[in-house]
Amino acid sequence: MILDRTAVPHIHDAIEFDYTLPPLNTRRLNNGLPLYWINAGVQDVVEIDWVFPAGLWQEQKPGVAQAAGGLIKNGTARRTAKEIHEALEFYGASLKVSTGNDFSTITLYSLTRHLPSLLPVVYEIITEAIFPEEELRIHKQNAIDRLSVNLRQCEFVANQRIDALLFGEAHPYGRFSKKEKIEAITREDLLAFYAKGYDLSDVQIFVSGRVGDKEVNDLNEIFGKISVAKKESATDIFSAPAPSDRVYNVINDPNGVQGAIRIGRLFPNRHHPDFAPMIVLNTLFGGYFGSRLMSNIREDKGFTYGIYSSLSPYLNGGSLVIHTEAGRDVLAAAVKEIYHEMQVLCNEPADEEELLLVKNYLLGNLLGDLDGPFSIMQRWRSIILNGMTEATFNTNIAIYKTITPQQLQALAQKYFDAKDYYEVVIV
């Protein structure tokens, strides 16, 4: 059949496609630890994530979770930091540790064929880290130096202040770095946090890439041999304060010509029925380059190079925050326009064509997330760590496709009331 090149091909909207989360393989190691894996991709590479409940939520002393994550691979009972890094570099592998509000994750990127040599190194790091005093001293000095530089930046200070206002400075999600907190961290603090937070009894392992039965058996041989006992974990309860003042204007740099704006409120996490609909509303409002906030405050008014709103869901709560930087002389005007756009969404239903564009943007990005084993696993990992199932994914897709302007307007009226927001402006 000859292709008719004079005929314009039909363009399909992303909303027309079916979305299916590729299947996930699961098993228990010999000691009962959960392992999840996806065998896909064309390259001989693999990503392994060891996820531990070792985030800010679990720390008993500020700064310890970040310090433990930063130093866990800087020395074991058998190897120095230099020897560990040389062992990884010899095989062209990368080992990263990321610490968040709820979890800490150790991530290994490697050629699949090198796993038998690398897995014992990771196991040693997870079970035999010693946190040498000299490494801690260097870490603390570097952290203090970075903090000193960051505190001169209005956007850094604004991020600290809005989280502290929303959750409370004593709350794990609202804590922020201070010099005296960093200085107070001791090696004993790290060892105690490491022993509890990085206990293999609580690990969840996620593997993606070119991985089959051999690689699963290699993991089982190393990580399935240790005796583990599942512990009962108590969930601490924190309550966010409700300060009477909701507007904070701070002069951080008397000579500053630019300021940072953060306007936010608490918002439920992924388990709340309003979360998925709010993904759509937030995208329309300030979640992508074509949003209402961007069109008004950047394109029309020229107050900023960029403005966004974002949802930050955690295991034990979440927030919705609008964030931008603007010239000092237009900060008040920019804040006024942000509240104006909230009010417009409360008073008028969105246009069908605009909503279709938002839906196609959301679902088009999702198509990218479902292409490639690493990104597919990231989607599965989020579902599992948040205690959800594939049914949640399917429900969310249906919401993205079918939500109406009237439903978005009702949602805006519920969550875009200006009196529910904290406002921080830092110059």
Image: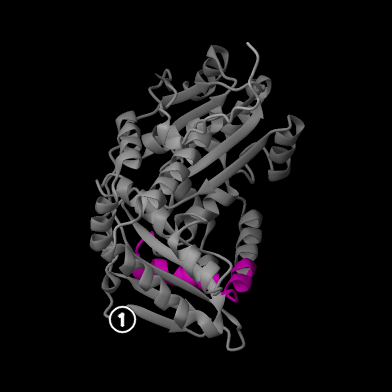
Outermost residue on the top side: it is: 1
Which element type, helix, strand or loop, lies under badge 1?
A: loop
Asked whether 380 or 8 is in front, the reply is 8
Asked whether 273 or 46 is in front, the reply is 273
- Check the image and tell me how it is coloured: one colour
Q: Which residues are magenta?
A: 145-173
- Expressed as whole percent of the image width and height from the top left, the position of residue 287 reads 45, 55
Q: Residue at x 40, y 78 (%)?
A: 336
- Expressed as whole percent of the image width and height from the top left, the position of residue 391 reads 30, 30
Q: Residue at x 60, y 22 (%)?
A: 41
Residue 285, compared with residue 275, is above or below; it is below
- Expressed as whole percent of the image width and height from the top left, the position of residue 6 reads 64, 27
Q: Is residue 176 visible?
A: no
Asked whether 266 or 51 is in front, the reply is 266
Residue for badge 1: 245
Residue 407, compared with residue 326, is above or below; it is above
Q: Is residue 197 visible?
A: yes
Q: Residue at x 62, y 51 (%)?
A: 132
Left or right: 411 as drawn, with respect to 168: left
**Quadrant showing the N terminus:** top right
Q: Residue at x 59, y 50 (%)?
A: 71
Which quadrant of the figure has residue 91? top right
Whether the magenta-drawn stretch holds residue 25 is answered as no
SS majority, magenta: helix
Left or right: 140 as drawn, with respect to 29: right
